[in-house]
């Protein structure tokens, strides 16, 4: 894949973790609405909800890499296999490339299909004038029988992103999703807009992560290494945390990989229950999620969703969850396979 063909993504996240790409944040929101049959506002003053365009990220990162004398970036090369010979990893590639390494950081996606995915279709639009009545929505749940919501963000002047998102085990029709985004925009804000571009994505939602072997120099990173928060799809900040951890490792410092920490194990268990409930009771789950936003302090929810909760955050969020369904699924999870 050539650099220009890289899948363009609009990464958003709450500022809960410092990273070297903060200067690329183009847009920021201090409040987000979550709406089901009623609505609540998530206060993001402490942890702003910020957005980076992956094109800006690529411009920055590749120009830094070009200046470095000991890094070569190779595009359009399919790595089919990586095997260990002695202490060296040998790459089997389809092109004629001789390559071996002492350390491997591998972000190639897993090939196995996932039982739950976050599927979304985003439309970037420009209105003739800025929308006076626009408010960013993190989740505007539809009244479908599926776990489905619309997401909307302002992207400067009269530009906006509107997205239709499903958490589902099914395949979705992208064209149908496009149409429902247009219907949503027209119903709320009228049709005085033009389409700037579109974005489609599928993010695996799974707690079934194969952890990296201790002390191995072959290290899975990114989504296949469990960077995605299974119940939300948020991944970007976890990837930054993971990069920081491996920099520490290469500098000989000790650390515990995040998926192996006690906190992450608890969160994965919770996410597994949540995903099972979403899969089996999508409509009911919308109420559960809405109540989570309604009953907990904004800072707690944001830390929880961003994978940086304190133990007190986790306990209060569990406390405020509907008990009966969670206990039922906690018992079920002993015999069911992980999502
Ligand atoms: C459209 C979209 C929007 C997203 N928005 C958000 C967001 O708002 N917030 C958030 O937190 N997360 C978001 N995510 C999730 C996540 O942050 C991104 O997917 C992120 O780019 C994942 O990084 P990665 O390194 O795991 O995978 P990728 O960025 O997909 O990197 C994998 C790389 O491996 C290469 N590759 C694959 N197979 C081979 C092979 N056989 N040989 C050689 N190279 C190979 C690919 O070409 C690719 O460059 C989004 C994802 C998508 C798809």
Image: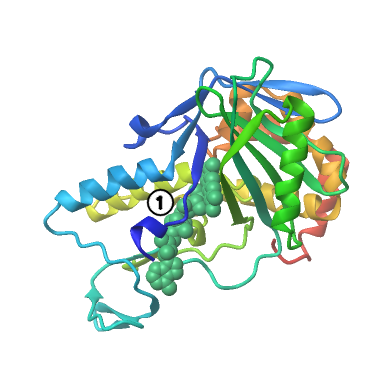
Quadrant occupied by the N terminus? bottom left
Residue drawn at x 15%, y 52% as measured from the top left? 68
Count of numbered circles in the view: 1
Specify whether 90 is left or right of 155. left
Q: Is residue 319 visible?
A: no
Q: Is mark 1 within 8 Å of ligand 1?
A: no
Along the viewing direction, whichever of 107 and 28 lies nearer the viewer: 28
Q: Residue at x 50, y 42 (%)?
A: 10
- The residue that disc 1 covers is 256
Residue 161 visible somewhere in the drawing: yes
The answer to whether 24 is drawn above or below residue 247 in the figure is above
**Compared with residue 195, is residue 93 higher up or lower down, i.e. above or below?**
below
**Residue 92 percent coordinates (x, y):** 34, 83
Picture quadrant of residue 137? top right
Left or right of 136? Residue 263 is left
- SS for tag 1? loop
Q: Is residue 99 above or below residue 240?
A: below
Which residue is drawn at the image coordinates 78% and 23% (left, top)? 39
Quadrant (top left, top right, bottom left, bottom right) of the C terminus: bottom right
Q: Tell whether 168 sits left or right of 101.
A: right
Query: Which one is nearer the viewer's eye here, 271 or 312?
Result: 271
x and y, in percent, of residue 322 in the image? 83, 36
Q: How is the image coloured?
A: rainbow
The structure residue drawn at horizontal position 34% and vertical position 30%, both measured from the top left corner, is 23
């Amino acid at each position: 894949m050539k650099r220009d063909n890289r899948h363009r993504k609009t990464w958003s996240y709450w500022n809960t973790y410092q990273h070297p790409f903060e200067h690329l944040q183009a847009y920021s929101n201090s409040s987000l609405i979550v709406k089901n049959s009623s609505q609540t506002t998530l206060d993001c003053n402490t942890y702003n909800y910020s957005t980076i365009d992956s094109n800006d990220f690529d411009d920055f990162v590749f120009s830094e890499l070009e200046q470095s004398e000991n890094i070569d970036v190779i595009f359009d090369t399919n790595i089919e296999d990586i095997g260990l010979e002695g202490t060296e990893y040998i790459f089997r590639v389809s092109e004629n490339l001789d390559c071996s390494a002492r350390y491997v950081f591998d972000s190639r996606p897993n090939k196995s299909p996932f039982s739950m995915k976050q599927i979304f279709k985003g439309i970037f639009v420009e209105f003739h004038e800025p929308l006076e009545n626009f408010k960013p929505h993190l989740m505007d749940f539809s009244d479908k029988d599926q776990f489905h919501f619309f997401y909307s963000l302002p992207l400067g002047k009269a530009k906006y992103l509107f997205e239709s998102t499903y958490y589902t085990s099914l395949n979705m029709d992208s064209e149908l999703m496009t149409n429902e985004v247009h219907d949503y925009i027209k119903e709320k804000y009228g049709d005085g807009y033009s389409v700037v571009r579109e974005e489609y994505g599928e993010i695996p939602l799974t707690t079934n992560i194969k952890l990296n072997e201790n002390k191995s120099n072959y290290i899975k990173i990114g989504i296949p290494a469990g960077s995605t928060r299974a119940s939300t799809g948020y991944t970007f900040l976890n990837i930054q945390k993971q990069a920081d951890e491996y920099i520490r490792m290469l500098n000989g410092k000790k650390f515990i990989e995040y998926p192996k920490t006690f906190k992450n194990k608890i969160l994965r268990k919770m996410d597994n229950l949540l995903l099972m409930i979403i899969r089996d009771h999508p409509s009911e789950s919308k109420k559960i999620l809405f109540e989570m936003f309604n009953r907990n302090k904004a800072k707690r929810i944001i830390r929880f969703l961003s994978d940086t909760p304190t133990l007190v955050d986790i306990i209060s969020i569990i406390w405020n969850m509907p008990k009966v369904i969670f206990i039922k699924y906690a018992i079920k999870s002993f015999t069911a396979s992980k999502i």
